[in-house]
Amino acid sequence: MSTDAQQDSEEFHAWQRWHEGRIVAVAAPHGPLSLTGTHWLADHPEGRIPAVPGLWREEGDDVVLAATPEDGLTVDAKPLAGEVRLGADRGPIDASRVAQGERRLVVLSREGLWAVRDFDPQSPVRQAFRTIDATPYDPTWSLDGVFRPYGSDRTVRVENADGRERGLGLSGEIAFTVDGAEHTLQVAVEPDGSLWAVFADTTSGDTSYRFRFLRPPAPDADGGVRVDFNRTLLPPCAFADHFICPFPPPGNTLTVAVPAGERNRIDG
């Protein structure tokens, strides 16, 4: 297919809409570029987090936040003066329970540890962001694949972007062919049935970010699945250093180059 024909195809236009939507989402006021800190409460036993208002402590299965009117905090859009018990925020960042003006203070739980994430639309990283460098749609990187579920889910320990090891759940693998050779990636199954892979390839750390995400749709009844590397995603930690993205598990570093999808963040 010629380049002109590719760019006139419905697949190209669908990819272009996806790419433009990704840029808008990343640059949103409370998108990943606005994360200025992930503060683990275990690192602050006295309850004071530098540059974060309030007094935070773990108590049982909750986090307790204490604040005065001078802290300027709101919980559920109401000013907080006193204490409130909080669980982990699971919805959109801009709908988190705790706020200070435009800032959102998001309660996070990972493997029994609690943290507070600080999302600030005035983040210098957000102000500097220009766009996402991505390779234009190439139909040769939209591949037929097959999902092979494991007999039972597995958990492997992998290093995360913050230098700590955490468990990564895996439910099976997808197999696909590149230049006549079969390759596989281990994947997790999301609640909606779609798949998620963390992978690297021979471009990683060179012409693309050090690892990337792939989110194929739910397989069909026979396990068939579209493996579209054109929609390869940069992980959140490519936009802010304070995310704790998992690195690829053993076996998820491809021995081929994948010159497709999102490659790097570009600042202006």
Image (cartoon, rainbow, N blue to C red):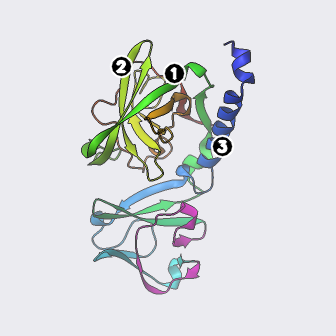
Q: Which percent across, then down, holds residue 44?
A: 30, 67
- Give how far apart the Cα atoms at labels 2 and 1 are: 13 Å
Q: Which percent across, then down, holds residue 8?
A: 75, 23
Which one is earlier in the sequence, the residue at label 3 or at label 1? 3
Quickly name the residue at label 3: 21
Which one is earlier in the sequence, the residue at label 2 or at label 3? 3
Q: Report the residue that reaches farthest toward the front.
A: 221
- Give how far apart the Cα atoms at labels 2 and 3 are: 30 Å
Quickly name the residue at label 1: 259
Is 79 colored magenta in this rendering? yes
Q: Is residue 208 left or right of residue 188?
A: right
- Quadrant location, the N terminus: top right
Is 201 colored magenta in this rendering? no
- Quadrant location, the C terminus: top right
Residue bounds of the magenta highlight: 77-101
Dot 2: within a 10 Å radius of its alpha carbon, few (fewer than 14), some, or many (20 or more) residues?
few
Q: Amino acid at mark 1?
A: Pro
Q: Amino acid at mark 3?
A: Gly
The answer to whether the residue labelled 3 contacts the one labelled 1, judged by CB atoms less than 8 Å apart, is no
- Give how far apart the Cα atoms at labels 3 and 1 are: 21 Å
Q: Which percent across, then down, holds residue 87?
A: 40, 72
Quickly name the residue at label 2: 255
Q: Is residue 69 above or below residue 226?
A: below
